[in-house]
Amino acid sequence: MRTRQFPVLSILLATVMAAQLACGRLDRLGKSGSTTPSNDPTVDEILERYQKAVGGQEAVERVKSYAATGRFETSVKRVSGTFQAWGKEPNKTLSMIDFGPNGMLKKGFDGETRWLQTPVGTTSDNSPEEMAEMERDAEIYRAGKIKSLYQWMKLEGKANLNGRGVYIVEGIPVKGPSEKLFFDRENGLLLRWDMARKVPERGNVFVKVFLDDFREIDGVKEPFIVRFAFESFDFTIKLDELKHNVPIDDSIFRKPGK
């Protein structure tokens, strides 16, 4: 096992393991402090359309747990392997990435403690900024609650993304730099989410998260391909199977040794 690769993989996991495939419940959309170009929809209207596009509030609220399996690949030395994830209401998640000869990486949250396990040890981090980032990470796979993650949202304008017309919405979190969300103007789905992540000794690292291959599972549309594009490498997750409302023992979400 070549441990010299783990610094790279640890950064990759800490910033990319946003694959906490949560399908949680929606919050109601309230009033937003948004500004809008003439004749374009408001932020509220864009988010409401997104909610409907993925199946609606009722369908999303029926999902209380999930289990997912798939594969991943990166542009870092062409590393690839398998991926598994579990989630359960309220706010419990576990993700596992198997790098084969290089070992297994796990990231979990039991509702109180956020932890990361690599072949060289286990750490935990419950700082407010890290917890806020993790909450935004989980929303990649959620149909709602996006608005509650930001103290201010505004419509920046329109653009084309890979041949699709999109609305660009800027979100300003309580802590950290602003982020951007790209919603398909035709079908309302979220196609890209530009996120900022704080990495030790490196400061803010920006990642473009692309969502693709939406499939309907129990009335809810889920992205089966998610690509995380960094400045120097990509990390792509491709799901093979996703099941909702599966029985899950709470013990799997606890930090090892706890």
Image: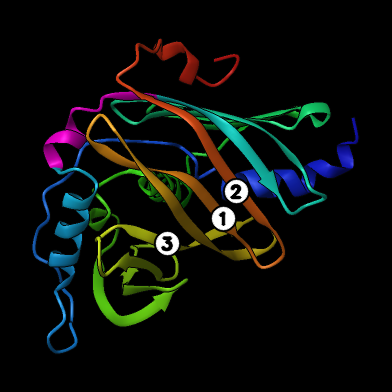
Question: Residue 127 at x, y = what percent?
Answer: 47, 45
Residue range (magenta): 57-66
Instruction: Tell me the distance, in whole angstroms, between the alpha carbons under discs 2 and 1.
Output: 6 Å
The image quadrant that residue 258 belongs to is: top right
Instruction: Tell me the distance, in whole angstroms, between the alpha carbons under discs 3 and 2.
Output: 14 Å
Q: Is residue 48 above or below residue 25?
A: below
- Mark 3 residue type: Trp
Marks 3/2 in contact by CB < 8 Å: the verdict is no
Residue 122 seen by the camera: no
Which residue corresponds to mark 3? 193
Q: Is residue 80 above or below residue 157?
A: above
State the residue at coordinates (44%, 52%). 212
Q: Is residue 230 above or below residue 68?
A: below
Residue 70 as seen in the image, left or right of residue 245: right
- Mark 1 residue type: Phe
Which residue corresponds to mark 1? 228
State the residue at coordinates (46%, 12%). 251
Which mark identifies residue 214?
none
Assign a secondary structure to mark 1: strand
Does the magenta-highlighted stretch encompass residue 97?
A: no
- Mark 2 residue type: Thr
User: Is disc 3 surrounded by few (<14), some (14 to 19) or many (20+) residues within 10 Å?
Assistant: many
Q: Earlier in the sequence, mark 1 or mark 3?
A: 3
User: Is disc 2 surrounded by few (<14), some (14 to 19) or many (20+) residues within 10 Å?
Assistant: some
Residue 218 as seen in the image, left or right of residue 77: left
Residue 79 seen by the camera: yes
Which residue corresponds to mark 2? 236
Residue ranking furthest to the bottom: 38
